[in-house]
Amino acid sequence: MMRRLITTVYALNFAFLLLAQPQLARADEPQYEDDLALVYGDKSVISVATGSALPLRRAPAVATVITAADIQATGATSLDGILETVPGLHVGRSTVMNLAIYTIRGVRSALSNPQVLLLINGTPVTNAYTGDRGLISADMPLENIARIEVIRGPGSALYGADAFSGVINIVTKTAKEQDGTRFGVRLGSFNSRDAWVLHGGKWGNIDVAASLQHSRTAGPHAVVERDAQSGLDQLFGTHASLAPGYQNLGRAATDGNLELSYEKWNLHLGFMHRENIGTGPGIGQALDPSGWGSSRRFVSDLKYKDPDFAKDWGLELNGSFTYYNENASVSIFPAGAFGGAFKDGFIGSPFRWERHERLNATLHYSGFAQHHVRLGMGVSKEDLYKIRETKNFNPDNSPINVGAFSDLTDVTDTVPYIRPHSRIVKYVYVQDEWQFAKDWTLTAGLRRDQYSDFGNTTNPRLALVWEVDYNLTAKLLYGSAFRAPAFEELYVINNPVVNGNPALKAEKMRTTELALSWQPQPGLQLGLNLFRYQMSDIIRVSNSFLNENGGSQSGRGLELEASWDASRSLRLSGNIAYQRAIDDITQKDPGLTPRRHAYLRADWHTPAGLLLNAQVNHVADRQREPADPRPKIKDYTTLDLTIGSNRKYAGWDWTLSVRNLFNADVREPSFYSTPFVNLPNDIAMGGRSVFLQFGYKL
């Protein structure tokens, strides 16, 4: 049925375009520029699609831009909350430290999230061990964000590894956007406290933008009715489980940024610190109220940009260095686990230290008529240079002595979970934006990546953009992407559950998309996106407990978007996404992700100078994994309300936000396991919460 629907929609839209074309005003008519400004206004541009700033409607990708105004209006308190508003993007949860899993178009894994590349001002936020954002991504703040650019679909032709199902680029505020000093505080449910200070100004001829933010929370009171230890208690006849009980969801976060800009140079220094990150439902899906994790990230990023480096040539240089570390102390299972074999619990403390060094150069050439050529090359080193591990259990899961705290043993030099590794990545790419006819642009790109540990990969992209008229744009897109195997998938050792496999290849994806954007009248914007993808060489754990390339998956779906300025003071907007994925081996839905996702939003600027915002988020039709006999995950609908000052009074502004007003039972799926399901009632997300925020600008 879905295939017939997509085919029908394709046919109807192309028929509409062909029939409507003669009646539409042409772009070369005198009123075109005025009409363009009237229809689109001061619309945001996007740079993550090509590496150069383009109007969103002409970008050769399916993209969404979230502005600082959107963040303020919705009352969002973290990156995870605001990303749920993007069509086709659902923020799920992992059982590992309750970390967010950004699921784009149904593509996800159970525990980690290496399929989506996160950038801050174009610099990747990643770690070599898991291949995703790691613990540092917990509770990423929003106050210093000017805009968030989201690409749904492949981005490896420009960004390389992990730009697999999508790319998220966070653009921080410049000195001009800060323009002065602003303080803010926020208090809320679960003993949540946030404070920040932002500054933008001049230091001689140097533009200075700086920010410092700190947040702390005890986390929502999300209950786990039964956990993995409950199942073990049934097997061993014990009563060691701490369930029913609350998840461990507390955390503290500190973020600082300093940006110095002088003429063509830009220096960014930043740090992110996460401490006392709770273990969520538990690393082993057994409640662990005292376990914790922490992480630190320091980055220095120096950019040089000269658009007129030589006649018809522009030059960009970028060098960055990132230090990253993670550590944790967790009870994987509680005291008395495994029939009492572990007196004080099944305890482990893994530590990791990484360095990431990147250097790249990009040349822009505009000497050919109607062409903009982009040439790039770069090299990076990912270095897991140090590890440390203490634990009170052996590689076969038997206890060291009686499994007490006093039995914790440093196994770094004997039987660690991994040893230090590094990889060198070299790449070159070329991209040409060719306006081969009036209103037609073809973007073609190709990137070649060479990895020192698993080999080479080549990824092309093609994007045909047709500006049918000033109010109608059509895009036909094709691209491929890859996900590099993470160090844990390649090199993990002394683990009875799964072993690394140095022979792994990269996961691959090919995607085709059709996107239509239509503005039938000023203030009304409609969008339709259709997509199909094919994944291959998916890394999965085999029956021999080895990571292997053995899976493939196909998917298709659509995303509908709309926004309507009903009046000068009222805007209504929303989106609906539908996707269907099939495991090519089982011919069943791989599970865990919503097939249907709807989001509605209303913004009302009242005559009294207030901004009222309402958001409805509906997540539905989440299937279980093919072998899981449980019924499908329950649907849920949440309503968020926010009221705030639309104008500043003597420098002050305020916002009051209620999340999940009706206290809906929101749960994210737990994955299937045998001989019993570790979390049979899934992962509860907590209920209603209230936040009050004040800001003051000097």
Image (tube, rainbow, N blue to C red):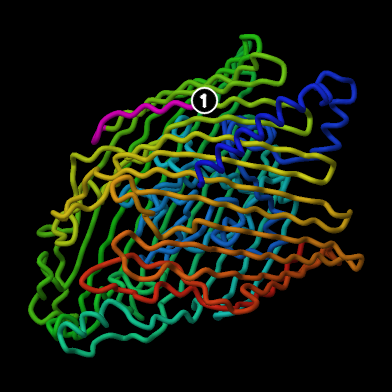
Residue located 78% across and 67% down the image = 612
Q: Amino acid at mark 1?
A: Leu
Q: Quadrant of residue 226?
A: bottom left
Q: Position of residue 248 (x, y in %)?
A: 41, 77
Mark 1, Cα crowd under 10 Å, few <14 / some 14-19 / many 20+, is: many
Q: Is residue 421 left or right of residue 157?
A: left
Give x and y (percent) for residue 162.
41, 42
Q: Is residue 229 left or right of residue 494?
A: right
The image position of residue 622, as x and y in percent, is 46, 62
Residue situated in front as seen by the camera: 545 or 374: 545
Which type of secondary structure does the marked residue at label 1 adopt?
A: strand
Residue position marked by numbered label 1 in the rendering: 462
Q: Single out the residue that lies furthest toward the left.
A: 401
Q: Percent from the top left, x then y, of residue 7?
A: 55, 37
- In the rendered view, does 511 fall on the left or right side of 281? right
| Front residue of this view, candidates 24 and 255 | 24
Please identify the residue farthest to the right as the structure is shown.
Answer: 607
| Residue range (magenta) | 452-462
The C terminus - image quarter: bottom right
Give the dominant element type of the magenta stretch: helix, strand or loop.
strand
Residue 384 appears in the figure: no
Does residue 22 show up? yes
Dividing the picture into quadrants, the one containing residue 404 is bottom left
Q: Quadrant of residue 451?
A: top left
